[in-house]
Image (cartoon, rainbow, N blue to C red):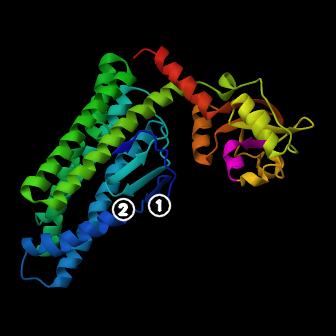
């Protein structure tokens, strides 16, 4: 499953790099790894070939589990390598509880490229299924029944992985294929993404209902809950994927200087917090102000920083003691794309950025202002 444009900070474990792509494990991955290992070693393989030793079952389970996740990684790498071939950077691939996700740095430029990136994953899974069929059929020097059972399992699981991802609902690969076709047919990425997203949400609701039915009427607690969790995850990602695409389109080709506020109200670093609250926060209604002293920009002070100070110290503490000093964290050049500015705000946890040119403050952008700009752009833009 290829992600539209990952924005999550990498909070997992970095493993290695392939073709410049960082491969990492989300901490949730360990849940599914050990769950799959246990179910294969304690349930599946003892049922497939009984009367073997416990160590044999656990060896088979470990081998199958590792090769399964290698298959998922191969699936994601297929997406990523095709994207790289078409000039789209892929910073990372993350394995997590529901499989794998590739972080695309941008949308495909045209429907044909979108189709190639999307279809690469399922095709790679079917190729792996064919490879494991060859191995389990005795056409290679692996004649042990245990090993052949592992290859048989991996053959079917790769067929299932490829087929599941071909379901035409975003964010699954089939949904991206559908989006590519509808984009080509209608000429609108926004309309194509909305269609694929709606189908993806419908499929997710189907999984949730099916999982609930299994839990309530069939007594299949584990598999039923699994369907529910997958459905909830797919529904949230389908909705977020559409919103993310609309957001990026709204910010496309817009620079920070195009929307910055130039009529700036600044404060002095020696100003007591009590005066800052009374004469600035309450008077102007802004949530933050640049801090300027003798024409030099020192930083930015926000309501968030002031709230950290005990109320009885408002008269003693000054702006300079609580402000965020001027640094790359709160400052950007005017040529910064607006999409990067918004991503920086999210990444740094700040609500405003100072626009600096040659060390001089020339403007400011705020998160609230960007949200209003995006809302207006979305109303004005055609589907």
Figure quadrant of residue 70: bottom left
Q: Residue at x 29, y 40 (%)?
A: 173
Residue 352 can be seen in this image:
yes
According to the image, label 2 marks what residue?
Answer: 29
Left/right placement of residue 282 relative to residue 123 reads right
Instruction: Give yes or no for contact between labels 1 and 2 (Cβ–Cβ under 8 Å).
Output: yes
Q: Residue at x 79, y 45 (%)?
A: 273
Q: Nearer the viewer, residue 99 or 269?
A: 269
Q: Is residue 89 magenta?
A: no
State the extent of the magenta-drawn residues as a range.
Answer: 299-308
Mark 2 surroundings: few (<14), some (14-19) or many (≥20) residues within 10 A: many
**Residue 210 at x, y = what percent?**
14, 47
Q: Nearer the viewer, residue 161 or 205?
A: 205
Q: Does 314 appear above or below 144?
A: above
**Residue 268 at x, y = what percent?**
86, 39
Going from N to C along the chain, the mark reached first, 1 or 2, is 1
Q: Which mark is residue 12?
A: 1
């Amino acid at each position: 499953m290829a992600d539209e444009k990952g924005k999550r900070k990498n909070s997992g474990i970095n493993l290695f790099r392939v073709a410049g792509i960082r491969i990492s494990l989300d901490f949730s991955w360990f849940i599914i790894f050990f769950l799959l290992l246990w179910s294969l070693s304690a349930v599946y393989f003892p049922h497939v070939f009984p009367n073997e030793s416990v160590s044999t079952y656990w060896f088979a389970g470990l081998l199958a589990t590792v090769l399964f996740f290698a298959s998922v990684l191969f699936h994601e790498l297929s997406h990523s390598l095709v994207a790289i071939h078409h000039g789209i950077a892929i910073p990372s691939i993350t394995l997590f509880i529901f499989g794998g996700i590739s972080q695309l740095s941008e949308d495909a430029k045209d429907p044909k490229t979108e189709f190639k990136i999307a279809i690469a994953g399922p095709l790679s899974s079917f190729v792996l299924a064919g490879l494991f069929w060859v191995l389990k059929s005795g056409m290679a020097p692996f004649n042990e029944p245990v090993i052949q059972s592992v290859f048989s399992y991996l053959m079917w699981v790769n067929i299932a992985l490829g087929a599941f991802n071909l379901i035409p609902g975003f964010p699954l690969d089939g949904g991206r294929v559908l989006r590519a076709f509808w984009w080509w047919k209608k000429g609108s990425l926004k309309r194509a993404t909305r269609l694929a997203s709606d189908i993806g949400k419908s499929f997710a609701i189907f999984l949730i209902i099916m999982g609930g039915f299994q839990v309530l009427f069939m007594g299949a607690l584990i598999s039923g809950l699994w369907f529910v969790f997958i459905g909830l995850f797919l529904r949230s990602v389908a909705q977020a994927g559409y919103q993310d695409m609309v957001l990026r389109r709204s910010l496309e080709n817009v620079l920070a200087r195009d929307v910055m506020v130039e009529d700036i109200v600044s404060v002095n670093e020696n100003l007591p917090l009590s005066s800052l609250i009374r004469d600035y926060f309450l008077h102007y209604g802004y949530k933050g102000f640049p801090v300027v002293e003798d024409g030099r920009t020192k930083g930015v002070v926000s309501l968030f920083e002031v709230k950290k100070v005990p109320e009885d110290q408002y008269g003693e503490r000054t702006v300079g003691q609580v402000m965020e000093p001027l640094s790359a964290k709160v400052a950007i050049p005017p040529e910064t794309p607006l999409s990067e500015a918004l991503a920086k705000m999210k990444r740094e946890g700040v609500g405003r950025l100072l626009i600096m040119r040659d060390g001089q403050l020339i403007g400011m952008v705020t998160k609230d202002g960007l949200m209003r700009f995006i809302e207006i752009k979305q109303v004005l833009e055609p589907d």
